[in-house]
Amino acid sequence: MKKIILTGDRPTGKLHLGHYVGSIRKRLEMQDSKDIEKMYVMIADSQALTDNFDNPEKIRESLKEIVLDYLGCGLDPKKITFFVQSMVPELTEYTFYFLNLVTLARLERNPTVKNELQQKEFKNNIPVGFLCYPVSQAADITLFNATHIPVGVDQLPMLEQTNEIVRKFNSLYGETLVECEAILPDNENCFRLPGIDGKNKMSKSLGNCIYLADEEEEIYQKVMKMYTDPNHIKVSDPGKIEGNVVFTYLDAFQTPELFKKYCQEFYDLEELKKAYQKGGVGDIYIKKLLFNILNDILKPIRERRKEYAKDMNEVYKILKDGTNEARLVAKENLKNFKHALKIDYFE
Ligand code: TRP
């Protein structure tokens, strides 16, 4: 069976390096893969509104930024159908019926939601829409019969919950929906990329991001500020690798080619790590190396992004065409769904 790929992002800001290694890199690889029947990338604006309902302008602005990030990265509209979640109302219909198949307790147990609830400090005022977004995410995935979902590890609880809903639906109404599988990054260092502060994962709300659209100078400043090893004071001091963000990023972003291009003194990253641990390698040295590698990756993305930004009409047309196409599929699949639910009265 050929794969149907679907994934998406909340438009709550520009995309950053965490998105890049967590899922974009896999998407780039998959768009060229032979065993793919169809690939969708959805801008999850409705989901973004569940915790930004008081700031619709932010979502509207971010939608634009995110499409530019996609195109800048090289995600190709000829190979991928890009669409906007809120413009596919069939998703809302699926969600409404799925809500019957999930308990409140189960939603409150979802680890990602639990985390977010703690961060947001809603206390007793949790918006119902927010708590239910995993159910709407199950609709995103199943409406398109998606089989493979390239995501970061924080999304695994969503996919687990989706598959529970699928099993429940099928057992009640007959085999209709398909279960999905996560596609994680190959490199474990990319599972939860820390922010430049080294404390938390990279996240816009924590202000510790390097954005795909950042200018060279900004990237340089951010890399120079990165958390390393607080006890590595003199160049001759032995340094620690664990928890040292510069090395975490080097692990996540280097390739043997990039390493050779920007570091001639050491044979490979492992050798550099050993030297750093022994003492004699300064933080500025490793930071400059990281900056060069990151800039090598981000420069073409930034330039392509700027090229696309010159003609926003063309960019919106990509989204509009994709959304129209996604809707045709959605309408067709909704028929089967309604048939299984026995609410297709006049068919
Ligand atoms: N929850 C995802 C995120 O925060 C975005 C998303 C919405 C998504 N629907 C999806 C991801 C369906 C994969 C599949 O990044």
Image: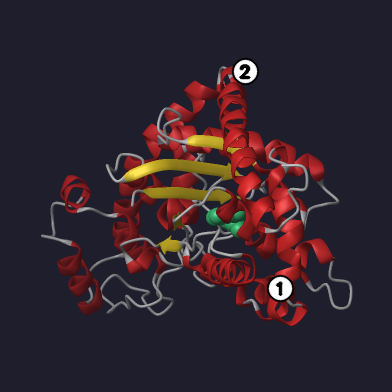
Numbered badge on residue 216:
none
Residue nearer the viewer, 311 or 104: 104
Task: Decide if residue 314 is on the left or right side of residue 47.
Answer: left
Residue 246 position in % (x across, y down): 37, 63
Residue at the spot of label 2? 313
**Closer to us: 294 or 81:** 81
Ligand 1 is found in which quarter of the picture? bottom right
Residue drawn at (54%, 33%) of the image: 68
**Callout 1 crowding tier (Cα within 10 Å): few <14, some 14–19, many ≥20:** some
Which sits earlier in the primary sequence, circle 2 or circle 1? 1
Inter-mark Cα distance, 2 to 1? 41 Å
Q: Tell me the amino acid under the disc marked 1.
A: Val
> Counting other residues with Cα less than 10 Å from the Cα at mark 2, is it few (<14), some (14-19), or many (20 or more)?
few
Left/right of residue 55 with respect to residue 305 in the rendered view:
right
Q: Identify which amino acid the numbered label 2 is placed on.
A: Asn
Q: Is residue 294 above or below residue 325?
A: below
Q: How many marks?
A: 2
Looking at the picture, how far across and down is residue 7, in whole percent? Answer: 51, 50
SS under mark 1: loop
Residue 212 point in image, percent of width and height:
48, 43
Q: Is residue 160 visible?
A: yes
Q: Is residue 223 visible?
A: no
Instruction: Give how far across and how far down residue 193 sits, in percent.
Output: 45, 64
Q: Which mark is residue 102?
A: 1
Q: Is residue 25 left or right of residue 136?
A: left
* Quarter of the figure with residue 36: top left
SS type, badge 2: helix
As drawn, the residue found furthest toward the left would be: 267
| Above or below 87: residue 202 | below
Which residue is painted at 70% across and 58% down in the image?
Answer: 341
